[in-house]
Each structure stands twice: as structure tokens, then as C-alpha cells.
Amino acid sequence: MPDTYDKKLRIGLVGLGNWAKSVYLPILLKREDVDIVAVSARTTETLDFAKSLIGNEIGLYGDYRDLLGKTDIDAVFIGIPKDVTATATIDAVRAGKHVFVEPPLFLGKRFSLLENLISSSGKSFHVDVELNYLPIIERCKEILQNNNLGELITSKIALGVNWGSTSQTNNYAMMENVIGLSTWYISLFDMFNSSPVKSATYTSLNEKTADIGSIKVGYQNGCLGEWQFNLRDYPNPNLNCELTLTNGTIKCDLLKGLLEFQVRDGNIIKETHLEQNLDPAIAEAIGFAGMQESVNEFINSIYSEKRDGLFDLRKYTNVKDIHSMLYSYLSLEEPS
């Protein structure tokens, strides 16, 4: 353990919305090597809730910049509305903090600025795309590396949920919501294919159902990625991944931890990954899957100074480029 962290890591939470309260806050509270010492939020109700949940000794701030100014805070978890996430992230890196941030991260021309700040800071920086940290995804990577399945041709991710997005009557608002949501799914393509992006398109079922459709991504090496989504018709969530290669296929149920792969001779090998962080209460919300692994990767990187496993800004480049291409494709103004 580095000398800087020979005691508990002191963490500040920038934002304490439903996601933070129900997902990564419980994970942090269970770890014995961290202390949550500060919370910033816009409402007194949220700050009062933080005190009741975490303890009276916690520092409470109505402005996140005051929290960042505390020199005894080592790391911050940022989970706030997307229109202010980029600015808060830049401010946090400038303040010398290790940063865990909930995407999407729309930086525009500030991407290079943040990249340089992170490089010179020497701190851990992690974008929380938690599905990338599922044990079953790691197993898929092992199969690709260790079995003679040939070259990757296509990656498909299929999501079916009932998230009530039909309440958004503005079709453009639904499109923007889908683009932001795509972050967690299109990032999975990069787990199997490291090529830069060439193109990205958005196709919906019809003009009134922007929350049912697909996003297709073309890569410079010829590989294709597709995220198929239906955000309204599946009361029982499902999330599946299928990889097609020149000599076989890999299929997995990301919620149940089920995996099978077929090789050229026709043999099908089936596996069940019970170690996956998917107890029934968690699996219902889909995005919880992989959260424990993602949070632990970030915390452990600070103690060990081993950061290869982080989803850093360099790895976020393809996601950023896909978002930009989708906004352009739909003739929408990209946030920055």
C-alpha cells in the first residue's frame, strides 16, 4: 500500500441521487478501508438524508466546489445530472482527487483538456461502465483469447426492459435519453474489439417509438457492433450478448450468468457463472450488475497504484466518438 494511503481512504460524494443511494453507497459502506466523509447535494432534504444514513460527523455541502476544496478528501464519486457532470469532473481532477464518475460524459472540445489534466495528476480516473466488469464478460474475453474461434465479425447486445420512457412525449428528448443510455452497452463492444470507430447510426421502430430500435456501429477494422433496445415492453428485464466469429459463436445471458459457445465442429459448451453479482433483488434493475466489481476496481487501484483495469478516459474515446456520430446522424445538438 502506498504511504499516502496507509489509513482509510476518505471519500466525498458529489451528488446523492437514487442511483448513488441504492447502488454504490451500500458497496462503499461495507468496505472497511474507506470512510465517506462528505456529501454535496442541491437540496437540504438530500443533505439531511445523508446525515441520517452515514452519520452526524459527515461534512455537508450545498456546492460541490466547496467539497472539492477540502484537502483531506482523497477521492470523489460523481453522480449528478449530465449537463453538469463534465464541468464537475474537470473541477475534481484539477482539485487533485481520484475520480469515479457516472456517465454519460459529454465534454465536447474539453475532452483533450481533461485528458491532459488526468495525465498530469497521477490519480486514478474511472468512468463507471459497470457491465464491462461482469465476470461473464471477462470469461468471454478469455474464450476469445484461448479458443480457436477466429476473428470477430459482429457483437450484439440486446436489452429489453419496461422503464416507462413513453412518458416522454418529445421524440427528440427520447432520442437523447437513448443516446445517453447507450453508454453502458456500446462500451461493451470495446471489450472484444479495440479498433477505432468508423460510423454510428440510430434506427427506431418508427417516428413515435424512439425507445424501441437499434444503434449500429461500424469499426475501422470491419467489425460491426449493434445495441438492440426495447425500453417499454419487457416487464421482466433481459440483457443478452452474442458474439459472431469466423469459427464459432458466443452467447450469454448477462443477468443470469449463463454462457455458451459453439466451435466449428458444432460442439456447444455451456457454463453457469454463479459468482456473478446478480442476486434477484439486484438483477431486477439490470445496471446494478457489475457495480461491486467496478467500485472495487477503482478503490483497489488507489491502494495498489495499478490502473490498467480502470475504464479511463482513453478507453472512453470510442464511446465519445459514437455519441458525436449519433447526434450528427440525428441532426441534434450535442451537449458539451
Image (cartoon, helix red, strand yellow):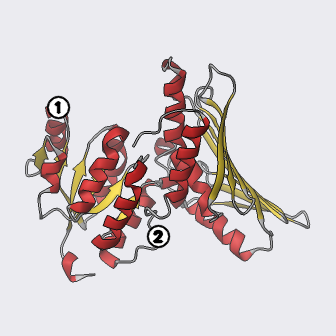
**What amino acid type is highlighted by mark number 2?**
Gly
Q: Position of residue 304 (x, y in %)?
A: 34, 78
Q: Where's the N terminus, which quadrant? A: bottom left
**What amino acid type is highlighted by mark number 1?**
Glu
Q: Where's the C terminus, which quadrant? A: top left
Can you tell which quarter of the image residue 204 is in? top right
Mark 2 vs mark 1: which is more N-terminal? Answer: 1
Give left or right: position of 97 versus 332. Answer: left
Dot 1 alpha-carbon crowd within 10 angstroms: few under 14, some 14 to 19, many 20 or more: few
CA gap between label 2 and label 1 equals: 36 Å
**SS at badge 2:** loop
Q: Which residue is painted at 41% across and 73% down in the image?
A: 307
Give left or right: position of 23 versus 228. Answer: left
**Vertical side of 39 occupied by 139: above or below:** below
Q: Which residue is mark 1?
A: 45
Can you tell which quarter of the image residue 295 is in? bottom left
Q: Position of residue 247 (x, y in %)?
A: 85, 66
Give the label, 2 or 1, closer to the camera. Answer: 2
Q: Which mark is residue 309?
A: 2
Can you tell which quarter of the image residue 214 is in? top right
**SS at badge 1:** helix
**Residue sitting at the far right:** 265
Give left or right: position of 218 versus 246. Answer: left
Q: Position of residue 20 (x, y in %)?
A: 32, 45
Dot 2 alpha-carbon crowd within 10 angstroms: few under 14, some 14 to 19, many 20 or more: few
Q: How many marks?
A: 2
Q: Which mark is residue 319?
A: none
Say whether residue 176 is visible. yes
**For this rendering, which residue is in front, 196 or 231?**
196
Q: Which residue is painted at 49% across and 19% down in the image?
A: 167
Say whether residue 29 is visible. no
Q: Position of residue 174 (x, y in %)?
A: 52, 27
